[in-house]
Amino acid sequence: MFGPPKSRRSRRVQTMPAVVVQALKRHRNLQEQERKLADGQWQETGLVFTTATGRHVEPRNLNTAFGRLIARAGVRPIRFHDLRHTCATLLLAAGVSPRVVMDILGHSQIAVTMNIYGHVMPAMQQEAAGHMDAALSEPEAEAGDDADE
């Protein structure tokens, strides 16, 4: 859909991982080749992802192409939108602050993020308990120290 974003928070700057930046650069090079091959039929839309002639990609065609990629990768089928959920789950599982994940997803409240992705939290709670153990435990005697001293 073309038009303004849903909300003010939807318009935001995203910091991209280097692997994404590299993939986008490769994509831009491929798109430049497609532009040349289109032999005058290229329609400049300013879009990042287009058809071989520069036009917008129909959602049905995107879903079909995504399905082929999933099959080729040999992974469990998911919907295209599930990539957003995968991103949030991986970030939370890696210990990224829920507030940062909220900002990345564009949620207006942290409660929305936590209601959707709270299932990731039990493992994080175990890790937090381990950190507290380490912080509150008495330091172990160094090797060679006499206990009698």
Image: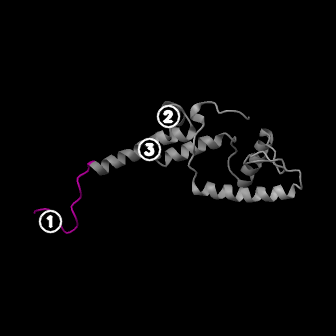
- For marks 3 and 1 on the same chain, the one whose residue lies earlier in the sequence: 3
The span picked out in magenta is: 136-149
Say which residue label 1 marks: 146
Task: Name the main secondary structure of what is drawn in magenta.
Answer: loop
Residue 24 point in image, percent of width and height: 67, 55
Quadrant where the C terminus lies?
A: bottom left
Which numbered circle lies on residue 114? 2
Seen in the picture, residue 72 relative to 122 is either above or below; the reply is below
Judge from the rendering whether residue 126 lies leftward or rightward of residue 141; answer left or right: right
Residue 146 point in image, percent of width and height: 14, 65
- For marks 2 and 3 on the same chain, the one whose residue lies earlier in the sequence: 2
Residue located 89% across and 53% down the image: 40
Judge from the rendering whether residue 67 lies leftward or rightward of residue 22; answer left or right: right
Say which residue label 3 marks: 124
Q: CA distance from mark 2 to mark 1?
A: 50 Å
Q: CA distance from mark 3 to mark 1?
A: 38 Å
The amino acid marked with disc number 1 is Asp
Q: CA distance from mark 2 to mark 3?
A: 13 Å
From the viewer's perspective, is the residue at label 2 or at label 1 nearer? 2
